Amino acid sequence: MRAIRQYEFGGPEVLRYEEVPDPELGEGRVAIAVEAAGVHLVDTTIRKGEPFGPVGVAELPMTPGREVAGRVEAGDPAWLGKRVVAHLGVANGGYAERAVAQVSSLHELTEDVDAAEAVAMIGTGRTAMLLLGLAEVQPDDVVLVTSAAGGLGSLFVQAVRNAGATAIGLAGPAKLAQVEALGAVPVDYTDPRWPKLVERTPTLVLDGVGGDAGRAAIDLLGPGGRVVVFGWSSGTPTPLEGIDAKGISVKTLERPADLRPLEEAALAALASGTLHPLVTRFPLAEAAAAHAALEGRATTGKVVLVP
Ligand SMILES: NC(=O)c1ccc[n+]([C@@H]2O[C@H](COP(=O)([O-])OP(=O)(O)OC[C@H]3O[C@@H](n4cnc5c(N)ncnc54)[C@H](OP(=O)(O)O)[C@@H]3O)[C@@H](O)[C@H]2O)c1
């Protein structure tokens, strides 16, 4: 089969598309013919050889990729022939024509579900469910979303709209029309004057960009405002000094022990049409281009590799 292999840490060019042996099956596992594989911002951190959370620095060589959807073609007879989506865990062989997943990680998909959209919901969607639970959006909220055209951001805008609340979506200039189409008031936060362009006082900030943008977003909150902080795609965490004194409450992302209920909720939202993930697709062979585009802020929604 063909897969992306990484033998050294570095830029996107270290991702090589190669012929490799099929992955080995084991007890309680299935082989999936991959129709779509998710690309995550953290995959670029791992690719560079930077430590990531409890995983630390990845072991080489490896095939990156944590989320796949496709058809089970070997392994547990109860799953043979079924279409599934699964979260494989970090750097676990998703960027490939064939991936191996634990049976316990599988969710069955009906034939009409788009594989790339299912991949978007199994990882990024489950995180969105977790964070929306923390955020507790109310109909009278004015919610400021950083990177509102991104994987999480585009789901947040839809959820805010579904809750009957107002969304203000921060994005780069090429993405503003998409943010507006999702249901948010778009604001170009590459314009240094952007905080002055926000016409309503936010009550809640959802921030995964961090740095100066994250802090400027929080500084727009009125008394009693809330912020949910879940990452820093800008490369710098949001400075939070002094915000308690302003009466602003902060919640941060904490991974629960059992993620399956969140995965089920995300897939149910996809099936019902409550949430519709944006997807940017790249051919599997062009994983390096997908990483470069993600790091270059040139993608919207979830980035997905397709055969
Ligand atoms: N997806 C998950 O499951 C998950 C889980 C835990 C934590 N997080 C964190 O949540 C945040 C959002 O995750 P996501 O998966 O939805 O990613 P994302 O927002 O789709 O990430 C890419 C976007 O981040 C924005 N960005 C701003 N500054 C950037 C910079 N210096 N370099 C690259 N991108 C930059 C860009 O949007 P603009 O051009 O519009 O600014 C870019 O298109 C990240 O901090 C991530 O680590 C995500």
Image (cartoon, helix red, strand yellow):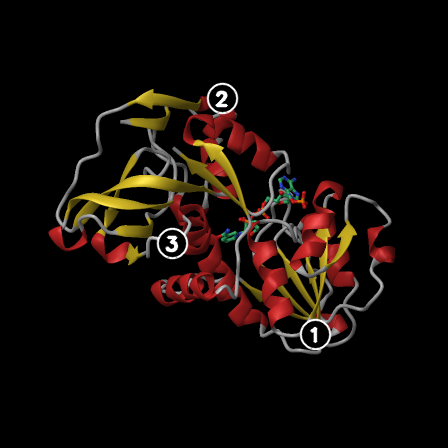
Query: Measured from the top left, where is residue 26 in percent x and y?
Result: 14, 43
Q: As drawn, is 282 to the left or to the right of 76?
A: right
Q: Residues within 10 Å of mark 2 (few under 14, many from 20)?
A: few
The kind of residue tagged 2 is Glu
Residue with the mark numbered 2: 13
Query: Measured from the top left, where is residue 99 in percent x and y?
Result: 28, 39
Determine if residue 49 is in view. Answer: no
Measuring 74% from the left and 71% from the top, which residue is drawn there? 245
Is ligand 1 closer than 8 angstroms to the Cβ of mark 2?
no
Q: Earlier in the sequence, mark 3 or mark 1?
A: 3
Query: Measured from the top left, where is residue 2 in percent x and y?
Result: 31, 26
Residue with the mark numbered 3: 112
Looking at the image, is mark 3 or mark 1 nearer the viewer?
A: 3
Q: Please say if 231 is above or below 206.
A: above
The kind of residue tagged 1 is Asp
The quadrant in which the C terminus is found is top left
Residue with the mark numbered 1: 141
Where residue 280 sits, quadrant-wise, is: top right
